Amino acid sequence: MNGVSLHLLINHFPLAALLIALGIGLWTQFSGNRTAFRLYWVLSCIAFACLLPVLKTGEAALAHLAATQSPALDERYAGIHEQMAHDFIPLYITGLVTHLGLGLGLGSQRLGSRWPRRLTWITLAILLLNLLVLAIVAHSGGEIRHTHLR
């Protein structure tokens, strides 16, 4: 398995996990279910933590792409995709730190009180922003191979 295969295998997980976590987080806000909140928190933290391996395998995929010189793959789009992924690293880190803080801060508080609910709305907004950015970066990655997306 080369870098391209590995990158394509794991790069969909953070996007799908954050989308599912967003749905669970919204449901948690209205239901007040503590177990669902823990699932939201764990799933979003795992998704943010998986972004680093996705970035690392993306670098290996770009190196493989440069070595193969395949006419079906456009190296220019790969460079744009890589630049976009690296430009948004601070946003990913913000998302991870926010969600870790949410879990640590709410570990001993009641979910029904006002402050944790407000904090959860803030983290849901950050998660949504990260999800939108990931979708844009993922679309730019799809343009490398799928010429009909250009």
Image (spheres, rainbow, N blue to C red):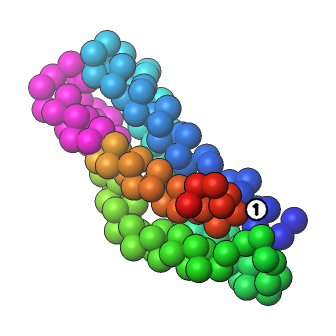
Query: Residue at horizontal 41%, vertical 47%?
Result: 131
Rendered image quadrant of residue 17: top right
Query: Residue at horizontal 55%, vertical 40%?
Result: 16
Magenta residues (range): 103-125
| Residue 142, x across and y down, in percent | 61, 58
Question: Is the N terminus in the top left, top right, bottom left or bottom right quadrant?
Answer: bottom right
Query: Residue at horizontal 79%, vertical 77%?
Result: 71
* Residue 29: in magenta span: no
Residue at the bottom extreme of this rendering? 67
Q: 34 above or below 104?
A: above
| Residue 104, x across and y down, in percent | 32, 44
46 relative to 94 in the view: left or right = right
Crowding at mark 1 (Cα within 10 Å: few <14, some 14-19, many 20+): some
Which one is nearer the viewer's eye here, 30 or 33?
Answer: 30
Residue at the left extreme of this rendering? 114
Q: 34 above or below 39?
A: above
80 relative to 30 in the view: left or right = right
For the stretch drawn in magenta, what is the main secondary structure? helix
Query: Residue at horizontal 48%, vertical 60%?
Result: 137
Residue ID for mark 1: 6
* Residue 110: in magenta span: yes
**Mark 1, secondary structure of its residue:** helix
